[in-house]
Image (cartoon, rainbow, N blue to C red):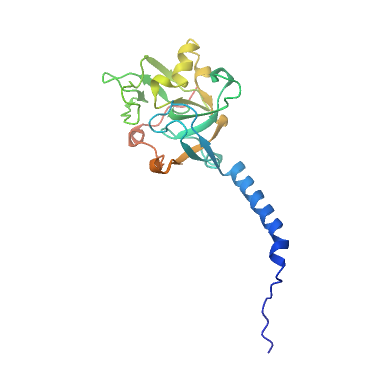
Amino acid sequence: MIDEQTKSNKGSFWKELPILLGVAIVVALLVRQFVVQTFFIPSGSMEHTLDLDDRVLVNKLVYDFRSPGRGEIIVFEAPEAWRNKPEHEDYIKRVIGTSGDRVVCCDPNGRIQVNGHPLDEPYIYPGNKPSVHEFNVEVPSGRLWVMGDHRQSSGDSLQNYMTSNGDIQLATIPEDAVVGRAFVLFWPFNRWDWLTVPETFEGVPASAPAG
């Protein structure tokens, strides 16, 4: 019986290298386009959960199977009315209220309530209040109420609600504007952390259907 073995041509590696590099580039582009993408933090609106120039990984696939959840940190394409400059498209904020939620500020202890459940928010920037404005809103169907963790330095739903004289459509973002969920802070290495949902959101009851 002949023992067949594969043989490699000494020059075959260099001939195949361009093909391998091409495949690797295509795979990387597909992953970036559809699965995971890196984003850097350009402002202090999420301090100190995310600081200026931090890098995060964003899962772009997860919301193809479900809607964004309360407490998750998301990257989204900001409405034009939210942008300081036209080219500032991608924003990163925390989801506070989802479709149909009643979001109210504040309870007697100064906490934001979602469907009657008060949020304990240790992630808020030190010295900030959950909100310096009182409000009582119902999140429209298919939209999200989002806020930065640095509440006094964030162009978010609350700021746009106040500047639009209480226009809930201008204050919220459509779910289909969401790029993905930020799930890990990977740079700088000494700040590496999973971006999990804070426990306080577990106690929020289901909302009534949004109108």
Tell me where residue 37 appears, x and y as whole percent. 55, 41
In the rendered image, residue 48, in percent from the top left (x then y), is placed at 38, 31
Residue nearer the viewer, 9 or 1: 9
Count of picture labels: 0
Q: Could you say which quadrant of the image residue 85 lies in?
A: top right
Which residue lies at the image location 52% right of the left edge and 36% below the top edge?
39
From the viewer's perspective, tell me whether residue 127 is left or right of residue 175. Answer: left
Nearest the eye: 109 or 141: 109
| 84 w.r.t. 65: above or below | above
The structure residue drawn at horizontal position 67% and vertical position 54%, both measured from the top left corner, is: 21
Vertical arrangement, residue 151 with respect to residue 75, above or below: above
Front residue (pair 142, 122): 122
Q: Position of residue 194 (x, y in %)?
A: 41, 42
Is 68 placed left or right of 114 in the picture? right
Q: Is residue 4 left or right of residue 82?
A: right
x, y percentage for residue 126? 32, 26
Q: Residue furthest bottom?
A: 1
Identify which residue is drawn at 57% across, 25% down: 88
- Nearer the observer, 150 or 180: 150
**Residue at the extreme top of the image, as rendered:** 165
Rendered-image quadrant of the N terminus:
bottom right
